[in-house]
Image: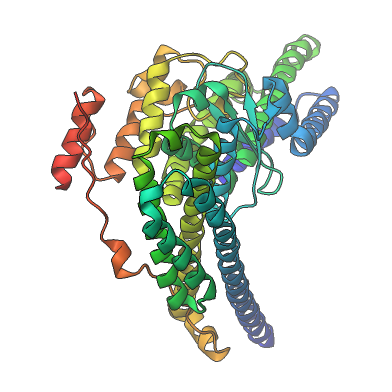
């Protein structure tokens, strides 16, 4: 997190440095951009969780429905295992199996689960998914990711403004500036949204691995989460209400693009989530089992019971 | 020179305060976690008579087992101290597990909404007990480790911090019943 903040600050710093020879108009633009970013950050900090919940159409639990009661119980269990206070629990009516957590700290956190997930997973698997979300809350990922998305927006905005004012001011400029400074600065300004997005995705992917590991620490049962991820992968239904801004919050990438399913360099660069097969593989390794991704389920269970006896 | 001297004193005092406060915070968290387990246990004590009453009518041949559960419950409620209550609780868990296993033989029972509800409640309570014990043990490990690692152990022994006791599971509960996992093809 500190690493990312330093990067964000240094990008800002380079901007400020690049602007100084520009003329009197620049500080105003930069300052207003910063103020705008600050307001955005504060809004996200104060109401971000509720905004996100509202944007996907989350509803509270109806404790009379057996499935909801089970979910409520599972969340209580995981809250106890992690030592966090009980988060609010919401459901979204959507066939895609997915889940996410939000909130700025342990006390104001919320976990949201789709009805598709409740229908698809059994108790043990739901527990794995909820543990993963509790891990995000415990590791403060929800706050980090919220700040990341705000910083992303801020950088994009700054870059946009900088580009406009740069071209604008070049017409009014008397002599040519120092080209050695201007060209790298221009390149940096143009590429910065891309760079910051890639950075944010890298952060997001690392946090997913960490949350998987912490979830196992809570449940002491890697197989529950592994099977849940397998089912989510095989269901392959995109979550309608997710946008690019909220994609990194979910347990598995809500879009189901080709690039998320594949291993390799490109997927490593472009996905908000690590390749799901890799996560499943790591979870099986935590259980001390050889992963068998291609095999059908029955054979795998038999393999487990023969090695155990 | 005196600047350096006072600086070192200040850093040292800060470190002592920081370590001491960390230990105190952990000790209180430990106590809280222990009380948390008690809350779950109380809930289980309340749920068990309900379950037994509901199930009684159906399970005519299992009166002995039901009686054992009731006895284990009152024994567990009366026990005090970490070790004694651990043993009584594990006996109770075992007899409850037996009832759940026996319930599989009664199709009428599994159709009863009330029983299903109670079963889910008891399952989650059992899980909650297990998870709060796990959390308690994690805290004990952290607390004891804080007291034993090098420079902090000097402060711990100076202020007379005592290592905490782990929650141990009795030998009887360790022998997991063998379950055949092979599924019919």
Say if A159 sits above or below A122 in the image.
above
- The residue that appears at 79% across and 33% down in the rendered structure is A43
Q: Split into 4 quadrants, where in the image is the N terminus of chain A?
A: top right
- x, y percentage for residue A309? 14, 47
Q: How is the image coloured?
A: rainbow
Residue farthest toward the top in the current orientation of the protein: A171
Q: Position of residue A57 (x, y in %)?
A: 69, 21
Instruction: Tell me which residue sits at (29%, 38%) in the image.
Output: A284
- Residues B78 and A1: in front is B78
| Vertical comparison of B43 with B20: above or below | above
Identity of the residue drawn at 37% across and 67% down: B169
Q: Is residue A35 above or below residue B97?
A: above
Of residues A5 and B139, the one nearer the viewer is B139
Task: Mark yes or no: residue A250 visible.
Answer: yes
Relative placement, left or right, of A217 versus A262 is right
Q: Give x and y (percent) for residue B82.
A: 47, 76
Q: Looking at the picture, tell me which residue is in the foreground, A256 or B87.
A: B87
Q: Picture quarter containing residue A302?
A: top left
Relative placement, left or right, of A284 versus A30 is left
Number of callouts in the render?
0
Describe residue A301's horizontal placement relative to residue B37 as left or right: left
Is residue A206 something one can see in this rendering? no
Q: Residue at x 58, y 88 (%)?
A: B159
Q: Position of residue A300 (x, y in %)?
A: 21, 31
Residue B150 lies in quadrant: bottom left
Nearest to the observer: residue B177 or residue A305: B177
């Amino acid at each position: 997190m500190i690493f990312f903040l330093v990067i964000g600050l240094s990008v800002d710093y380079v901007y400020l440095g690049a602007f100084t020879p520009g003329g009197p108009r620049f500080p105003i633009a930069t300052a207003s951009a910063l103020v705008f970013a600050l307001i955005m950050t504060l809004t996200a900090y104060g109401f971000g969780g509720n905004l996100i919940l509202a944007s996907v159409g989350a509803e509270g639990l109806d404790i009379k429905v057996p499935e909801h009661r089970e979910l409520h119980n599972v969340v209580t269990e995981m809250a106890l295992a992690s030592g966090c206070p009980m988060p609010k629990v919401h459901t979204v009516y959507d066939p895609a199996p997915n889940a996410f957590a939000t909130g700025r700290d342990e006390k104001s956190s919320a976990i949201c689960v789709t009805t598709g997930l409740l229908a698809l997973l059994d108790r043990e698997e739901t527990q794995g998914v909820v543990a993963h979300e509790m891990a995000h809350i415990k590791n403060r990922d929800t706050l980090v990711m919220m700040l990341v998305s705000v910083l992303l927006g801020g950088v994009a905005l700054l870059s946009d403004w900088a580009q406009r004012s740069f071209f604008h001011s070049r017409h009014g400029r008397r002599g040519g500036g120092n080209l050695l400074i201007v060209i790298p600065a221009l390149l940096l300004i143009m590429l910065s949204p891309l760079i910051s997005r890639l950075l944010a995705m890298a952060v997001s992917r690392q946090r997913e691995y960490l949350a998987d590991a912490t979830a196992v620490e809570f449940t002491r049962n890697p197989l529950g989460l592994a099977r849940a991820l397998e089912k989510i992968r095989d269901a392959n239904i995109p979550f309608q209400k997710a946008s690019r801004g909220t994609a990194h919050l979910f347990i598995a990438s809500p879009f189901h693009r080709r690039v998320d399913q594949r291993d390799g360099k490109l997927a490593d660069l472009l996905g908000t989530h690590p390749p799901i097969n890799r996560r499943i593989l790591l979870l099986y390794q935590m259980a001390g089992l050889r992963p068998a991704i291609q095999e059908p389920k029955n054979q795998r269970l038999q393999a487990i019971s023969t090695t155990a006896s | 020179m005196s600047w350096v001297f006072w600086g070192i004193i200040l850093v040292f005092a800060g470190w002592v305060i920081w370590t001491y406060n960390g230990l105190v915070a952990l000790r209180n968290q430990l106590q809280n976690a222990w009380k948390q387990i008690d809350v779950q246990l109380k809930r289980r004590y309340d749920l068990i008579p309900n379950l037994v009453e509901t199930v009684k009518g159906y399970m005519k041949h299992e009166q002995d087992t039901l009686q054992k559960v009731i006895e284990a419950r009152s024994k567990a409620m009366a026990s005090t101290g970490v070790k004694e209550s651990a043993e009584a609780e594990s006996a109770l868990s075992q007899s409850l597990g037996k009832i759940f296993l026996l319930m599989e033989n009664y199709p009428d029972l599994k159709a009863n909404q009330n029983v299903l509800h109670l079963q889910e409640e008891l399952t989650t309570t059992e899980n909650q007990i297990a998870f709060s014990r796990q959390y308690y043990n994690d805290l004990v490990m952290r607390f004891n480790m804080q007291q034993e690692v090098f420079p902090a152990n000097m402060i711990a022994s100076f202020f007379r911090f005592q290592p905490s006791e782990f929650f141990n599971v009795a030998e009887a509960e360790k022998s997991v019943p063998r379950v055949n996992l092979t599924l019919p093809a």
